[in-house]
């Protein structure tokens, strides 16, 4: 009996030792902060300025994506101004002053107004998202009518409804493809002309972006942060002191450029802490990491309008991986609607990132349903599965489906 207890104790000790050795997964920002001894405020200022530069750059590169989207543009501008107001010390404080002196906001609205005039001349009076929603509903209406008729007419006649039903099942996708193609053709035909006619104002925006990037660059050099650790994306490659590391063509032919900052001439690269090398700078074999790790993130404080997630906060939950797996293993799954319909405003400025810093692309969305017989509790949420990132990893994102949804006590530590 004693021997058996000793054996159990030994096994428990080994399991405990293994558990202690298992590292807690941290984001790249957290590792940089801890490894370089930076405070959260320093990292926060860098992130705020990166958001500002990415947002203004996206407008300077493609203002057509913001036409007829007053609410979305106002939301981004509110976020931008909030970030500017929080950059109130050091060289960053000059950013807000420059923003006001250069009349950046009036310039944005002026460009938007002119872009809408061009759109109206081409018989475009709605945003792309608005058109997709409207035509989706129009395409679904006759299908719903036919489905209702199946339950009304005699069974021997239902066969004749199957052909139009099959056709109507594909109609929304056909309409969507046609609308997107027309929109892309419109942008392609008018983008160059619009740039030529509004060159000075677009260059003004790009000059402001360069000022913000230069501020970040100087701050990184002053704090001796290894520049190659700060990765970010922009919609154009018109800026100085940047090193292009990759580019990717997204849906609709939009190109995203991925950068790090360049070291000035004569400045030796700053040493990268070993802990970061181990986590994010390991060798790549055949395009994959030698170790595959799935990462869980949770969307918190979501804002939902008409079934669309418009605003959210992201939190890494690797320390709760076992709890999340337990939850998922006890769920029923069914295919949900497309990610583009759940998050139609998913842009580089609001994107979810892989732990390596790259923007995550999502194609697989599942609706997860959990229930408990004893308590009669039920809970539904989304599971977004990303495409495999260039670093070799995937991320899995859990999100409530509604703002005020009741989360069972059992799972509050995951979603709380």
Image (cartoon, helix red, strand yellow):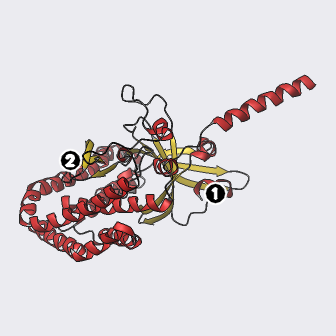
Labelled pair 1, 2 in contact (Cβ < 8 Å): no
The numbered mark at residue 412 is 1
Between residue 139 and residue 213, name the one nearer to us. Answer: 213
- The residue drawn where x is 35% and y is 56% is 346
Place of residue 35 in the rendered image (x, y in percent of width and height, measured from the top left): 51, 47
Above or below for 312 versus 269? below
Between residue 186 and residue 167, name the one nearer to us. Answer: 186
Quarter of the figure with residue 101: bottom left
Between residue 406 and residue 225, name the one nearer to us. Answer: 225
Place of residue 123 in the rendered image (x, y in percent of width and height, measured from the top left): 12, 66
Quarter of the figure with residue 404: bottom right
The numbered mark at residue 125 is none
* 233 to the left or right of 110: right
Place of residue 295 in the rendered image (x, y in percent of width and height, measured from the top left): 51, 43
Of the two numbered discs 1 and 2 on the same chain, state the one appearing first in sequence.
2
Place of residue 241 in the rendered image (x, y in percent of width and height, measured from the top left): 24, 51
- The residue drawn where x is 63% and y is 42% is 322
Between residue 157 and residue 403, name the one nearer to us. Answer: 403
Report the Cα–Cα distance between label 1 and label 2: 41 Å
Assign the N terminus to one quadrant of the image.
Answer: top right
The numbered mark at residue 253 is 2
* 88 to the left or right of 317: left
Above or below for 288 versus 147? above
Above or below for 86 versus 5? below
Label 2 residue SS: helix
Q: Residues within 10 Å of mark 2 (few under 14, many from 20)?
A: few
Label 1 residue SS: helix
């Amino acid at each position: 009996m004693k021997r058996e207890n000793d054996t159990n104790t030994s096994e428990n000790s080994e399991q405990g030792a293994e558990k202690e050795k298992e590292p807690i997964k941290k984001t790249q920002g957290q590792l940089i902060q801890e490894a370089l001894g930076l405070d959260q405020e320093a990292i926060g200022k860098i992130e705020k300025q990166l958001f500002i530069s990415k947002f203004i750059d996206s407008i300077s590169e493609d203002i057509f994506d913001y036409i007829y989207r007053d609410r979305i543009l106002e939301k981004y501008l509110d976020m931008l101004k909030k970030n500017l107001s929080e950059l109130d010390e050091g060289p960053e404080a000059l950013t807000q002053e420059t923003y006001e002196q250069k009349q950046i906001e009036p310039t944005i609205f002026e460009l938007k107004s002119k872009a809408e005039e061009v759109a109206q001349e081409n018989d475009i009076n709605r945003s792309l998202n608005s058109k997709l929603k409207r035509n989706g509903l129009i395409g679904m209406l006759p299908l719903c009518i036919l489905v209702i008729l199946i339950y009304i007419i005699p069974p021997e006649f239902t066969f004749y409804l199957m052909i139009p039903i099959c056709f109507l099942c594909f109609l929304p996708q056909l309409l969507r493809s046609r609308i997107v193609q027309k929109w892309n053709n419109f942008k392609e035909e008018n983008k160059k002309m619009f740039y030529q006619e509004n060159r000075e104002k677009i260059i003004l925006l790009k000059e402001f972006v360069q000022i913000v990037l230069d501020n970040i660059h100087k701050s990184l050099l002053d704090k001796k942060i290894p520049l190659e650790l700060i990765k970010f994306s922009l919609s154009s490659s018109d800026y100085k002191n940047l090193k292009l590391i990759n580019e990717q063509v997204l849906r609709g032919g939009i190109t995203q450029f991925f950068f790090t900052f360049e070291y000035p001439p004569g400045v030796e690269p700053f040493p990268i802490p070993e802990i970061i090398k181990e986590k994010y700078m390991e060798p790549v074999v055949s395009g994959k990491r030698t170790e595959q790790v799935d990462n869980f993130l949770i969307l918190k404080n979501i804002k939902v309008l008409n079934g669309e997630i418009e605003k959210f906060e992201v939190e890494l939950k690797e320390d709760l991986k076992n709890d999340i797996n337990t939850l998922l293993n006890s769920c029923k799954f069914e295919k949900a609607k497309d990610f583009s319909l759940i998050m139609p405003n998913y842009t580089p400025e609001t994107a979810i990132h892989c732990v390596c810093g790259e923007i995550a692309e999502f194609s697989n969305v599942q609706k997860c349903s959990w229930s408990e017989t004893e308590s009669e509790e039920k809970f539904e949420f989304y599971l977004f599965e990303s495409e495999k990132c260039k670093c070799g990893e995937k991320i899995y994102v859990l999100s409530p489906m509604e703002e005020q949804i009741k989360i069972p006590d059992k799972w509050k530590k995951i979603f709380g």
